[in-house]
Amino acid sequence: MSRVREIVLARPVAGPPVAADFEIVQRPTPAVDAGRLLVRSLYQSQDPYIGSRLRGRHMGEPAPAPGESLPGFCVGEVLESGDPAFEPGDRVVGEMGWVEVGLMPASGARKVAAGVPASAHLGVLGMPGLTAWAGVTQLAEVGPGDLVSVDAAAGPVGGTVGQLARLLGARAVGMARGEAKCALIRETYGFDAAVDLNRSDWIEAYTAETAPGPTVHFENVGLSVLMPAMQRLQNYGRVVLCGMAEHYHADTPPAQVPVGLIIGKRAAMMGLVVYDFYPRWEEWIALATPWIQEGRLAFVEDIAKGIEAAPAQFERLMRGENQGKALVQMSEA
């Protein structure tokens, strides 16, 4: 019987995940049954929410036990199908874990059309891109005349937020840590300005770049950025709370936003849970695909090669060292 390799937890995760928390195991190649697909993974997606999920801190979902399959999306090729809607050779994206070859529920699989790189369906056309589209267009309703600020702007969510804002006629100011990421924000994503959060005077720089104040702020990091942004928000501004990455692994009470500041700004503050927008995924893909093909919507990928590289790549993501969408290439496309 043939066997496949899979990444699982080697031990319970007590803090921000590190490479030593994972191990490679070998399992028999699973048999295909009705309603599932046997898929060869091409690219495995690594996303910040998985760090919380591994500690049982994400949307009430339990943490996987050591040895169990891990959460995560992949894009891959169907080898065998237990669903008549799919055939061997189809390329699909869906949840399958950190495995070279595995089973994917057909009910959660989407076929990947040609025309853009398959890996894009894990980033700009995947959950990160859908998240950006939902926050910018459906919650904040960004349009001409808006000034949008977003942190973690070198990542796949933040980078797409700023580009969408500009495509919709708004100005975009991004924040990130380090000049390399700020250069990516300006030169690749085309933001109007970038602010380096590593600078001691970043608040002054942010204030100058967003004068007379943002009308929309898209939050991915946490209170260290959210509070200065809120204080400079224009009256009747909109705030989208997408992520609070700096708080995910803190053993302290949940982050709190002063109610008085929201009232004083007459602000609308909206929580974004991307799962609400899964039924509209094809709408985003149809909108974004021509933009990608025309060069109007850029994306950057940080790719490690081989299943052996997945644990270290995930630790880099948890440390914020990735440049763009973090991926692991599991096999040749």
Image: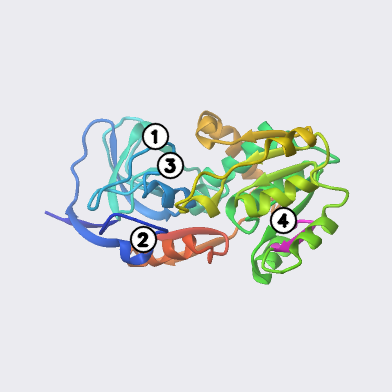
Q: Which residues are magenta?
A: 188-196
Tell me the element at label 2. loop
Residue at the limit of the structure toward the left, as seen here: 1
Q: Tell whether 322 sits left or right of 216.
A: left
Q: Check disc 3 and report the residue beneath it.
A: 58
Residue 235 is situated, as x and y percent measured from the top left of the image, at 83, 37
Residue placed at 69% from the left, 58% from the top? 175
Nearer the observer, disc 2 or disc 1?
1
Q: Is residue 184 above or below residue 249?
A: below
Q: Tell whether 40 sits left or right of 242.
A: left
Nearer the observer, disc 4 or disc 2?
4
Q: Check disc 4 and report the residue beneath it.
A: 174
Sequence order check: which comes first, mark 2 or mark 3?
Answer: 3
| Kind of residue at badge 2 | Ser
The residue carrying pointer 1 sits among few (fewer than 14), some (14 to 19) or many (20 or more) residues within 10 Å by Cα, namely few
Residue 322 is situated, as x and y percent measured from the top left of the image, at 53, 64
Q: Check disc 2 and report the residue beneath it.
A: 331
Quarter placement of the C terminus: bottom left
